[in-house]
Image (cartoon, grey):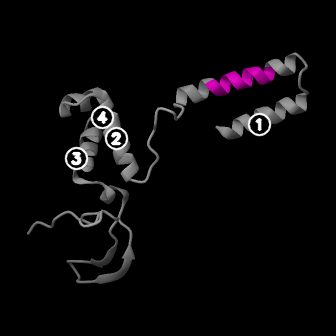
């Protein structure tokens, strides 16, 4: 007998379902309560299928594009959609990318050191600004 996969969303309203009973088929032990489903159970069948292809292709977007016959923006949109469904913040165009954030931090560090060299700030003030910059990221 094949056991069907559990769904994570209510087919009526779309809200997240809660598991209330767990059962061991071997020893007949049962647990009752309210249990949360994992992040993957929050996904629709289409989102789960997309993530399986994405993982199988090791996140290489060109390979995902080729296998699914979709464009780069569509791959990104589907990935963002799945991330949101799992409760993660999806990357948007306005979110700084890691390289951009690193370049911005380097520039800010350079400006602080330049201000120190030009004696526009004290050594203590420069150290405080550098520490605050390091804490940010």
What is the crowding at mark 1: few (fewer than 14 residues within 10 Å), some, or many (at least 20)? few
Across and down, in percent, residue 20 comes to 33, 78
Q: CA distance from mark 3 to mark 2?
A: 11 Å
Q: Which residue is mark 2?
A: 79
The circle on residue 47 is: none
Q: CA distance from mark 3 to mark 4?
A: 13 Å
Residue closest to the eye, 70 or 12: 12
The circle on residue 131 is: 1
Q: Kindly indicate the quadrant of the structure image that contains residue 133.
A: top right
The circle on residue 49 is: 3
Across and down, in percent, residue 101 comes to 59, 29
Choose mark 3 or mark 1, whichever is in front. 3
Q: Residue furthest left?
A: 1
Q: Is residue 41 magenta?
A: no
User: Of marks 3 and 1, which one's residue comes earlier in the chain?
Assistant: 3
Choose mark 4 or mark 1, whichever is in front. 4
Q: Which residue is mark 4?
A: 75
State yes or no: discs 4 and 2 in contact (Cβ < 8 Å).
yes
What is the crowding at mark 2: few (fewer than 14 residues within 10 Å), some, or many (at least 20)? some
């Amino acid at each position: 007998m094949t056991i069907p996969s559990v769904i994570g969303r209510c087919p009526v309203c779309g809200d997240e379902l809660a598991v209330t009973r767990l059962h061991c088929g071997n020893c007949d032990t049962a647990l009752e309560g309210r249990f949360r489903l994992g992040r993957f159970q929050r996904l629709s069948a289409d989102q789960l299928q997309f993530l399986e292809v994405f993982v199988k292709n090791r996140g290489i977007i060109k390979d995902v594009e080729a296998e699914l016959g979709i464009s780069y923006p569509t791959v990104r949109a589907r990935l963002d959609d799945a991330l949101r469904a799992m409760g993660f913040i999806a990357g948007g165009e306005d979110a700084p990318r890691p390289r951009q954030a690193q370049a911005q931090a380097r520039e800010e560090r350079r400006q602080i050191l330049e201000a120190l060299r030009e004696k526009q700030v004290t050594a203590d003030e420069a150290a405080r600004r550098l520490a605050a910059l390091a804490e940010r990221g």
